[in-house]
Image (cartoon, grey):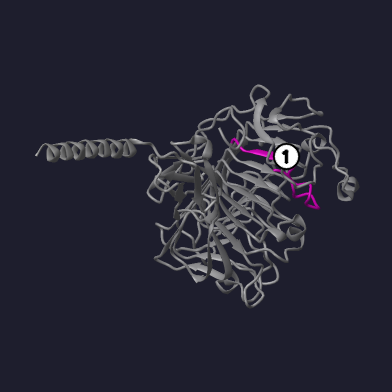
Amino acid sequence: MMRLWMLMAIAIASATALTACSDDEDDKTVELSKFAIDPTATTLTPGETLNVNAQFFPEAVTDKTVVWTSSDDEVATVANGVVTAMKPGTATITATPAANPSLAKTLTVSVTNKAMSASGEVSGTWEAYTTVTVTGQLKVPADKSLTIEKGVEVIFNSSDGNGTGIEFTVDGNIYCQGTEEAPILFSVPASERSYANVTNCKNLWGGFMLNNRAANAEALFSHCIIEYAGCAMTETSPSVIAGIYTAGEDYGVQITTGPQYKGSLVVTDCVIRNGFADGIYMQGGKGIITHNIFAGNGATGGEAVNVKAGTSTVVAYNVMYSPNTNGLKLSSAGQDDVAGRGQSKCVAYNNTIINAGWRRDGAKGGCIYVEKNILANVFNNLMVNCKYRAQAPKWGIPGVADGCDDKSVIDYNCYAASSIVSTLQQDIDDGTTVPYANYVSNKNYSDAVDAHSKIAQGANDLGVKFANYTLDTNKLDNPSYDEAWDFTATALPSGASDGSGLTSIVQSSLTVGGKTYTAEAPQAFFGAKK
């Protein structure tokens, strides 16, 4: 009996000892010796997600906590190993194991635009950060709308199947809503983006043709880059078929409102550049054109902004660099034509026009041209190195074929100039090589114009200065625009912007896409942005 009890005691003790050993093993920490993630590089499009696989060695490691971070949350975010692409760019995702931070691993995420092609009728929404390759004529049908979101790139082939430049016809509504950080680009392929293509217009697209005849039609271009339009019009061009342009004579404009257009056009915070013809050509409708940069528009003619009959437009706080002919061409040509258009009205103020008119051979180029019965108030504008002062043939003589409405005003402007000299033979021949000399006289000047304006009588005599541009920076006829330039005026002569109370002849605000856009009141400021 005693022997039995002793054996039982030994067994119990052994069992207790074994249990103690087992508990010690369970409490022992399993250290992380190696860590990896899969994949280590990937390419995504905005909105796409990726689950990153974290691998631990040994697999039974005690602590599997991972801290996930992104080098740029605007490009790609990460949470619990799920990467979400946000916008084009490159970001580094770092996975750091808490058990041993020195074993951290990284994933390179490249985010690229989504891709699609377009031709024919279009409507709906082109989503943010999409590259749209246009392969044929485009049209937004009547009673339809197209919204284009931020970061979209619209790339036009040089021609359609007929060999005709591709136009973007809008019979409905269009809303191009970019942002400062992610503008919308309308252009040709990168290999064709040279000014040589502008001068021969072979590889250009046809621009926007707005032709909605409804009074409530809407078109918005906010934070867009519109470039390399201006193809020659042919018999198969949509605008020729519609009777708006003439085959063999006209060229596509970056943005056109047709003579039947009755709606609202807002163009704000855009860059409109390198087109064969005008930047904006309005033949109908109401417009607000503010805080834009126009550069290098027009090859053998053309203006930054050109308005005709049937329009009511405010043009303010724009920079217009090296337009071929004028910064502003203001006319009521076409009044009372078969389209039933009425007198045009335009208010233009606080615009900065630089090196205008030097690429146009003849006496018509300058900075501002007013004619043919328009009611125009032009004041508080800053002109620098322009070929001529504001011109107004037959000033104050009402009549469709004659001068402007006798209630028009051109005054309180500033005309500054440097000593830079034109080397073009055309200017040498007619003696118009020096900017300030050309502000003195011209057959199209009127004594009733610019009575209170500041007009240079010599080089640099008005003391005008910009934040990052000197008056003699570039050749007068060079259309190349440097994005580093800043035309915010830092010095102006007294009285260079004293006009006031001259804006009431046109609307100061328009509501487009449910948002009201207002042209800021005149003030002592020059430059595209404030």
Name the residue type under label 1.
Arg
> Which residue: 69% across, 36% down?
485
81 or 206, which is in the foreground? 81
Q: Which residue lies furthest to the left in this view?
A: 1
55 relative position to 153: left or right: left
Identify the residue position indicated by label 1 in the image.
389
The question of residue 248 being in magenta is answered with no
303 or 502, which is in the foreground? 303
Query: Where residue 453 sits in the image (x, y, percent)?
Result: 67, 30
290 relative position to 61: left or right: right
326 relative position to 99: left or right: right
Q: Quadrant location of the N terminus?
A: top left
Q: Is mark 1 on a helix, strand or loop?
A: loop
Query: Where residue 397 sits in the image (x, y, percent)?
Result: 62, 47
Residue 394 visible in the displayed image: no
Q: Does 118 appear above or below 496?
A: below
